[in-house]
Amino acid sequence: MKCKTDCIERPLSLVFEKLGRLIGRHPGVFVLLSLYVAAALGAGFIFLKEMEENDIEDQFTPVNGPAKRDREIVAEHFPQSDEFSQLRLISEGTYASLIITGLQGENILTKEAFKEIIELDRQVKTLPIGNTFEKLCAKIEGNCVSNAVLDIIRYNAADIDTLAITYPINAGTFLGTTIGGVELDPNSSVLNSAKAIRLFYFLDEEKTKENTDWLDGFIQFFSNGTDQGTVSVSYFTSVSRQNEFEANSDSVISLFSITYALAINIAVFSCLRLDCVRTKVWVALFGVVSAGMAVLASFGLLLFCGMPFAMTVGSAPFLILGVGVDDMFIMISSWQKTAVDKDVEFRLGEAYKEAGVSITITTLTDVLAFYIGLLTPFRSVQSFCMYTSTALLFCYLFNITFFGACLALNGRREKSNRHFLTCMTVPEASSNAVSCCVGGVFDEKTRKEHEMPMEVFFKKYYGPFLAKVWVKTLVCLIYAGYLAVSIYGCFQMEEGLDLKHLATDGSYVGDYYDREDEFFSAFGPNVMLVIKDEHFQYWSPDARKSLDLCLENFGDLTMVDSEIPPTSWLHAYMQFGQSAPFDLNNEMIFKTQLPAFLNRSEFSHDVHFTDNHINASRMFIQTVNIKTAIDEKDMLNAFRETADKCGRLETPVDLIVYHPAFIYFDQYAIIVSNTIQNLVVATCVMLVISLLLIPNPLCSLWVTFSIASIIVGVAGFMSLWGVSLDSVSMINLVICIGFSVDFSAHISYAFVSSEKSSANEKATDALHKLGYPIIQGAVSTIAGVVVLAAAKSYIFRTFFKIMLLVILFGALHGILFLPVFLSFLGICSNSRVKDKPEQKDTSERRVKVFRIPAVQHLKGYSADPDCF
């Protein structure tokens, strides 16, 4: 059974051959042109500060998410008023907060503890930072918003021992967010003890500049020491999360130098030979420089074009340093398979013919996988994918031009048998024995350079070992275990980005969030129900009955506190009408009496009443036990589903549900479906590229199988490793597709195009050609990102974890699973007919050899064109 689909591959190979000859004739021109282009585009870095986009909401929440649209509706009908109400905030507000606990976790409701709490409150209100808190605070009836728990004891610590405080509501005041870790009297709702007190200090949001200065001073004051006598203090402000997030990128800058050192060492070591002429030390170094130039040029170009630079892009250089030199090593491999006695021009042409299609396939798959990531509704993902895909595209272009020219210059040095370091001509070695004084050995029979020892290992030992029946059985069992664990892990996956992970390790933000989760998770957000139907007849008994039924449906939800009734202006107004008495079933009376009621009550900002018309109104429902990301997702879905049901009642109630936290919860609604969409689209694109450029359809099917298998493995194991599915890990799953192709396309193609007669021999032949390159590629890529394991940021550590899984599983499929599975296909036969007898290793034209980090500075350049 023979099938050829090389109508694109063959002419493309000829084009690359002509390009290689052109570069081989004029290498200096291409070196200088590449350097000029990189320098010119790199000037775009002057716009880096301008283009930085680190707003958490903008970058890590879905673009045009439902909650953002709902917020616009709420803001239109209920703009922020001069009279502050925490319950009615449209945003999180501008505030500072303290969580105060006992040093040993003991009861905080003691006289000694409250003396220190009151002193802390005094210190906050008198911080000597420009304007005092009294001048900046949010106000109610001209007075600063106070803390309910301090109001209850009238700022007298002794009263805490004598007062009976009921929980969660005391004298109409909700205490669920200010007192935590409570223990109640068994026979009543009176507090026996508590472990935490939380204080809030809200500021007037209009005083932006003064507020920022005061909040910075607040952080500075408590960063000098938070333990006060018998209590421990955790602190937080509304700008803390953003400040810590912006500091994340600084935490990895010091790791770049380590990555560069690894890049240079691995590149040089991988290309090092004992032969002082054939060694490729300078070639490896300039390959690293090529990847650095790609980062410089691509980032500069996008900055010139005004592309936002998100913090997630900070991990892109590590990836590019790890994978951006792949093409270089493919070209080196192809160069080494050309006859050493040919002219440099023809050697480079043959190398390009063999390597050109291969590097085009891998570049297309990697770049398109990232560009498909632009379909995601998260700006952080879009920014990362745009910068990384463009950088990989420039890696491809510079490898063809700049590195190819450097390879030609190095070929001239080898042609004249010059020493790699001194550039002095040395005698040709008469045998395989070489030294620092002689060199230039090659295989006299093939007229090519000698094979590497690892290639011999895969041919003589590993391949035949893998062909044994009991080894194949063991491999199948290992794969079954791998697949089972992976599928199990997929069902354990959690969704969403925990906001505390945006801060660095050891940050005061993480400590505050930990205490909040420990002591204040009993009560969730107080959700706003907004009736946006301007035609809703509030005075109609039928309409009110429908609304009451709707509220009952909300009250029946497991995450709603049934003991705390909804905060409803309409219920209070109907009670007001009964006590007056007024016939509020009459539309005219209902509207006539409404303004007076609103002005005398706490509900003055809950009804949008203009021109004798109710445009919208709102109510509030208290939630409970929202502790995990799953709870947040379930609550959001349940509330929105219930709101939809209200719109389908006999008398429809058109309402929306809103809370500022829903802006972040929206990620749960789309993260899974969007990730699956990206993976499916990318996999289909990879299959099409494989069918077009790899001349064997069977090979393309195995590529698709490997992509699916590796994605399942990465998704499952990342879940078991504690990584949630969020906008950060979504980036890496998109990366997974590109690397799945890299590790699988070439091994399967090498198998189906092998000239060997049996399936086992075909598998051994494929491993002989590709086993060592796969290992080298895996090692070099991991070396590019391994330093991120030491990062203090969740974002960068997550990047490392998933990249490690991608590379390990990709290499495992390439050198273990695929060779065994392919060997079961004994019916496979050659799919190519050779044009020339000397073209023996055409399967290697798809070899993807190395991934090694890169450096950004050109070193070791000599004026002598032969000195490379």
Image: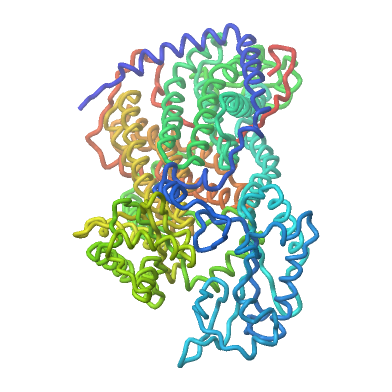
Residue shown at the point (66%, 64%) measured from the top left? 235
Q: Nearer the viewer, residue 450 or 87?
A: 87
Q: Residue furthest bottom?
A: 187
Where residue 400 sits: x, y (%)? Answer: 53, 19
Residue shown at the point (55%, 26%) measured from the top left? 395
Quarter-of-image position of residue 553: bottom left
Q: How many marks?
A: 0
Where residue 71 sits: x, y (%)? Answer: 45, 50
In the displayed structure, 420 sits above or below 682; it is above
Residue shown at the point (37%, 13%) measured from the top left? 11
Q: Residue furthest right?
A: 128
Q: Nearer the viewer, residue 574 or 457?
A: 574
Quarter holding the N terminus?
A: top left
Residue 472 in sight from this viewpoint: yes
Where residue 277 sits: x, y (%)? Answer: 66, 21
Residue 279 in sight from this viewpoint: no
Judge left or right: residue 192 versus residue 154.
left
In the displayed structure, 15 sits above or below 144; it is above
Quarter holding the C terminus?
A: top right
Quarter-of-image position of residue 624: bottom left
Where residue 4 sits: x, y (%)? Answer: 26, 21
In the displayed structure, 356 sits above or below 74; it is above
Q: Nearer the viewer, residue 318 or 109?
A: 109
Residue shown at the point (67%, 29%) measured from the top left? 856
